[in-house]
Amino acid sequence: MRSVSIIGVGCTKFGERWDSSLRDIVAEAGISAIEDSNVSGEEINALYVGNMSAGRFIEQEHIGSLIADYAGLARLHVPSTRVEAACASGGLALRQAVLAVASSYHDIVIAAGVEKMTDVSGGTAADALASAADREWECFFGATFPALYAMIARLHMRRYGTSREQLSMVAVKNHHHGCLNPISQYQMEITHEKIMKSPMVADPLHVFDCSPLTDGAAAVILAPTEVAKKYCDTPVKILGSGQASDTLALHDRRDITTLDATVSAAHTAFSQARIDPRQVDVAEVHDCFTIAEILAIEDLGFVEKGQGGKAVEEGMTSLNGRLPINTSGGLKACGHPVGATGIKQAYEIALQLRGEAKKRQVDDAEIGLAHNVGGSGGTALVHIFSR
Amino acid sequence: MTDNAPRFWRAIPQRYSLIGTHCSNCNEYYFPPRNICPNCRRSTQMEEHQFKGTGTVVSCTTIYSATEDFERQTPYHLAIIQLDEGPRMTGQVISGPPGVKIGMKVRPVFRILGKEGEKGIIYYGTKFAPLEE
Amino acid sequence: MASGIVSYGVYIPRYRIRLDEIARVWGDGNDVSDGLRVYEKSVPDMDEDAVTIAVEASRNAVHRAGIDPKRIGAIYAGSESHPYAVKPTGTIIGEALRTSPNFTAADLEFACKAGTAAIQACMGLVSSKLIDLGLAVGTDVSQGAPGDMIEYTAAAGGAAYVIGSSDLSAEIEAFQSFTTDTPDFWRREGMPYPEHGGRFTGEPAYFKHVTSAASGLLRRLDKVPEDYDYAVFHQPNGKFPARVARKLGFSKEQIEPGLVVPMIGNTYSGSCLLGLAATLDVAKPGDSIFVTSFGSGAGSDAFSIKVKDKIEEIRNGAPNVRDYISKAQYLDYAMYAKHKGKLRL
């Protein structure tokens, strides 16, 4: 298996992009990445795109073909594959691209992610997102997606003493980071009071504990490390890739306060990369809800189980902390266009490792990690990158 | 025309009467029913099992903002319930003022789970209520 | 061949609204309760309807006496508020009880007496040995138009009776019905609320039919009211059953245990069946109970019932009427309107 590197990245502004269609934003991200990499259309061997639910959001399937077409690659008949793993669709697209290049089957591959969520009503969007959970046995019985994470939060708070304030600290931190990120959906600071004043969604989660509905797209271009320098001065190596599944329904998990899929995917990625969690300098983790970030830093091995809340409170995961988490603003502030998130995470880590993260740059970042979760933990993807 | 009639109908025994399965090879209980036992896989020996419906609340929340189908019912309580026989399921809990608490014992009740609008099918099924009530 | 009640089960939703609260909203003064002799009525939860009530009552009935549901050969559910105009409540009850598919079913409607008509139908099938056990259910989440007098008493509840020919907890010795075409109270197809004839619902309707069926049965059996320990009459309010009892010669004491309307209102198809259940909850082997239902449109079914020894064995097998009456949670008018779907959204 040969080494794979990122030679170019691109990402659209995340937010409510009323004037842009799915085709518009995916082209935007694609062109941006291609220009960043100096690759030519003829060199692209394959496309992998993560998209959760274009069928529900814009009544369009066959996204693989659509993306190849609107990226101008259809006439070159580039193989194009849409992958879906709910909110981990982007991370999965990245992994598929990595496998394609690592195996020598392809040389230059684009991994993209896109979601256009705002063309439908909030209710329809929420229902589409609910299909990341177990439709028959969770949603039909009245569960909403936030309710599942709310139940995780309740038990985590009861068992480990995680506090309501610590949950807020995740959102406050990520909003602060978002203010430093030009593509972030939200560019405003928030406070614990503001979070508590926002309407309750599912006890104990308020509106501001939840990631928003967002339109956005991102793309990264992968090449074998041995030729990466031909295209880019600062290629970012992918040291490890891990993927894991777990039960679809939250109630079937071994332990409701742990995402075993994250633990397993992280183990695979760290083993492959031959590093351990302490060596990670910066990470993008899956904070679909504030509690999810707390779980993530525990399950990825950055802190002991149950200590996630304390770590946030002590500033470990802030920009000037020992291990800055979600410098992009995370899903919470930067936004969560479902299929795009996993690729945006790779984009952010690449910028950090290249030293191009400007106001949110983590000094001397050498090793980065991206963590993407599907549903309430049915799928997890972990990728480790290095300078 | 209405959507989902076959999908709803197929799971009626599960929703109304908590019919699941039991693997007599490893003695584990499953709700909803599974064809393949995750422990035994090819050595699966599944038989039908009707769960009593009594259980304990593992975690819970109160939902204030729901999808369109459930909007009218908010706020309502949702819980992960561990059935006495072992498996866990997700269900609504009907409860008076004290509300739902982790560790609370519950029993099954027969209620409307949802409706397909004014003209469509009414989905009946099992919710839970505190055992002492 | 003798037939009767093998087991019974009831269900009353836990919410209540006080009549004073309804009167407050409509400006009807504070003697409505005393006038009707009803103080509060039951209100269904947002996720309850005539079917869910029927299922809970039926499950209680089957459970009370440890009945094997596969023996049930017929299910007749009577209601004025079946949620489907086409698709019977009876099939859902059967599925929820886990009966075998080998049963017949059809839904009944006869205003407040559909439940007793269901009992009669089951008795026929059971006595003729065409089936082993029959399930007769009376259930309603009755509606009254906001501001109409009916709103004060239209309540929710139901009862289920397993009818058989052996292991009887109470034998039904005989019945007599009296039925005429009388337009005292009706609801047209598609209309949300019923209409009624005001005072016309009294003498020419309720009293005429109840007294005709009751006296007809007493005459046929050559019995008098004093021969009975208890009596249950249809309870649209607290006054009518007391008045008709007096007219027929039954005493206040005889109807007392079965008079549930003051605390829960008129449960329509569940009314007489709940009154009978409340009486069975306290009756002793050897006691006799006289029951006469009334359904607008109009008709009455009168029954002469003899309690058997088996009643003591099954008594504590399921919650009784007073258990449900005592579990009360009060609502104000706004919440009540939301629960009853009176707010058009």
Image: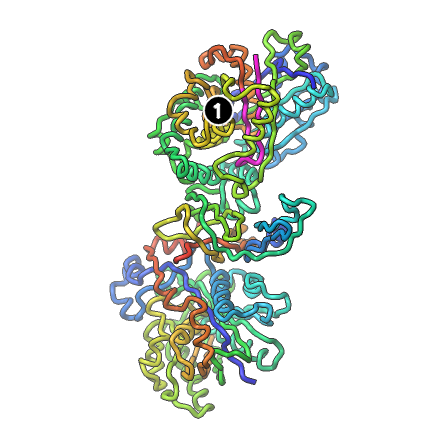
Residue at image coords 36%, 71%: C260
Considering the image in quadrants, where does the C terminus of chain A appear? top right
From the top left corner, tell me how far across and down residue A371 is, in percent. Answer: 54, 26
Considering the image in quadrants, where does the N terminus of chain A appear? top right
Judge whether C185 appears above or below A256 on screen.
below
Side of A230 where C243 appears, left or right: left
Judge whether A195 appears above or below C68 on screen.
above
Label 1 belongs to which residue?
Answer: A302
From the top left corner, tell me how far across and down residue A184 is, in percent. Answer: 48, 21
Is A80 colored magenta in this rendering?
no
Q: Which residues are magenta?
A: A369-387
Q: Quadrant of residue A80?
A: top right
The outermost residue toward the front is B26
Residue at image coords 31%, 61%: C18
Frontmost residue, B39 versus A357 = B39
The answer to whether residue C150 is seen in the rendering is: no
From the top left corner, tell me how far across and down residue A186 is, in percent. Answer: 44, 24
Residue at image coords 37%, 33%: A163
The three-letter code of the residue at mark 1 reads Phe
Judge whether C168 appears above or below A75 on screen.
below
Is A371 colored magenta in this rendering?
yes
- Secondary structure mostly seen in magenta is strand
